[in-house]
């Protein structure tokens, strides 16, 4: 028979072992999220899911830890927790290598074993702005520019590119715009670095030129296209992303065909405008979005917005002009109803929500 003293010692050791086992367990992973999901200056975010299992977010240039990143990247395995990566475009293209360069609104697509980045740039010699293409072997880059702009023009007409492979026709398309002109689309060649021979641009959504304060469509930009249940949904933003007079929101149009004809939400319903995501008391000027689908088939819209209480904290002043506002990355769930798509709540989500469904989250 064990002595009373020895029995007490055994009992104490068991308690310590159980206590250690309990404290040594890994922390339970949170299953809710709340905006913002990346609380840094990260404008014009494009989110993609790569074949390597990670999600990648690409954004307009910004100063990161005192150094200018020409194109920002962040990586995530669950769409909520993001890790910053190195500059996607460490070398400026020779045709846009100014001392104070301007690169923005990147979109990345994975195809043919490579990653193609379409972006906007301020060239050395042109008076207007340009669409550009860079290519990489990995989603983190380094992306290398093809050595010449894809398309240039007057003013800022040729900006905000978005590449889209039409699931119905297999055609490779590029949407862009606008500079107070329509959003456009044109077919890309098989190499994805130039437009298809003999192809022409098509106007798909048009600005509305009036001074109605509810009109966000005087200038439209930031096109993004998704396909669901027989409709192509074209998301776009307007009309003033930044500055003291920021007046920005996400709008939507739809079509049965990728090049259009597109019908806006306002045209279809008689609403005052086609807005599906607009400001609230905490978040100003939400817009320039991308869309990602989770493993349950739910769509999530990622976009930037300005925190009304932190407008200029660590903002990037290298963009110039009145754009020195801090635009951080947020997200909302998308809801499909009666053949149309809406952002849940109609404004940036303020409350905690359940994680998107992502199977086999990459560790």
Image (spheres, grey):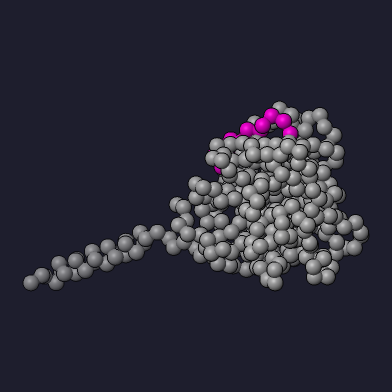
The outermost residue toward the top is: 94
Residue 128: x %, y % from top left: 83, 37
Residue 141: x %, y % from top left: 58, 38
Tell me where residue 150 sits by quadrant. top right
Res 300 visible: yes
Res 316 visible: no
Q: Could you tell whether 195 is left or right of 30 in the image? A: right
Say above or below: 279 vs 70: below
The magenta segment: 138-149
Q: Could you tell whether 2 is left or right of 43 in the image? A: left
Q: Could you tell whether 182 is left or right of 189 in the image? A: right
| Quadrant housing the N terminus | bottom left
Residue 72: x %, y % from top left: 63, 43
Looking at the picture, tell me which residue is in the foreground, 222 or 44: 222
Tell me where residue 346 sits by quadrant. bottom right
Say above or below: 304 vs 72: below
Looking at the picture, tell me which residue is in the foreground, 325 or 95: 95
């Amino acid at each position: 028979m064990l002595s009373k003293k020895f029995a007490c010692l055994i009992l104490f050791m068991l308690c310590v072992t159980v206590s250690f086992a309990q404290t040594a367990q890994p922390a339970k992973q949170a299953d809710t999220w709340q905006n913002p999901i990346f609380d840094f200056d990260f404008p014009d975010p494009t989110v993609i899911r790569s074949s390597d299992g990670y999600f990648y977010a690409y954004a307009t240039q910004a100063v990161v830890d005192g150094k200018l990143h020409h194109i920002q990247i962040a990586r995530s395995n669950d769409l909520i927790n993001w890790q910053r990566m190195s500059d996607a475009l460490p070398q400026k293209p020779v045709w846009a290598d100014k001392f104070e360069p301007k690169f923005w609104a990147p979109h990345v697509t994975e195809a043919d074993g490579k990653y193609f980045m379409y972006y906007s740039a301020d060239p050395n010699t042109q008076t207007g702005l340009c669409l550009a293409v860079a290519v990489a072997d990995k989603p983190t880059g380094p992306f290398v520019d093809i050595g010449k702009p894809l398309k240039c023009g007057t003013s800022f007409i040729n900006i905000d590119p978005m590449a889209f492979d039409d699931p119905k026709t297999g055609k490779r398309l590029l949407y862009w715009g606008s500079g107070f002109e329509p959003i456009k689309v044109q077919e890309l060649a098989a190499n994805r670095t130039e437009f298809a021979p003999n192809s022409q641009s098509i106007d798909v959504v048009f600005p509305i030129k009036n001074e109605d304060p509810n009109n966000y469509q005087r200038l439209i930009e930031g096109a993004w296209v998704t396909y669901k249940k027989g409709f192509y949904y074209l998301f776009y933003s307007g009309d003033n992303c930044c500055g003291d007079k920021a007046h920005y929101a996400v709008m939507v149009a739809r079509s049965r065909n990728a090049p259009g004809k597109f019908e806006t939400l306002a045209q279809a319903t008689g609403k005052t405008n086609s807005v599906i995501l607009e400001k609230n008391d905490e978040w100003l000027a939400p817009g320039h979005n991308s869309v990602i689908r989770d493993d349950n088939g739910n769509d999530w819209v990622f976009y930037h917005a300005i925190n009304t209480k932190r407008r200029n904290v660590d903002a990037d002043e290298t963009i110039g002009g009145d754009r020195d506002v801090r635009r951080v990355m947020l997200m909302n769930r998308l809801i499909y109803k009666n053949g149309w798509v809406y952002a849940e709540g109609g404004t940036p989500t303020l409350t905690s929500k359940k994680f998107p469904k992502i199977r086999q989250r990459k560790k």
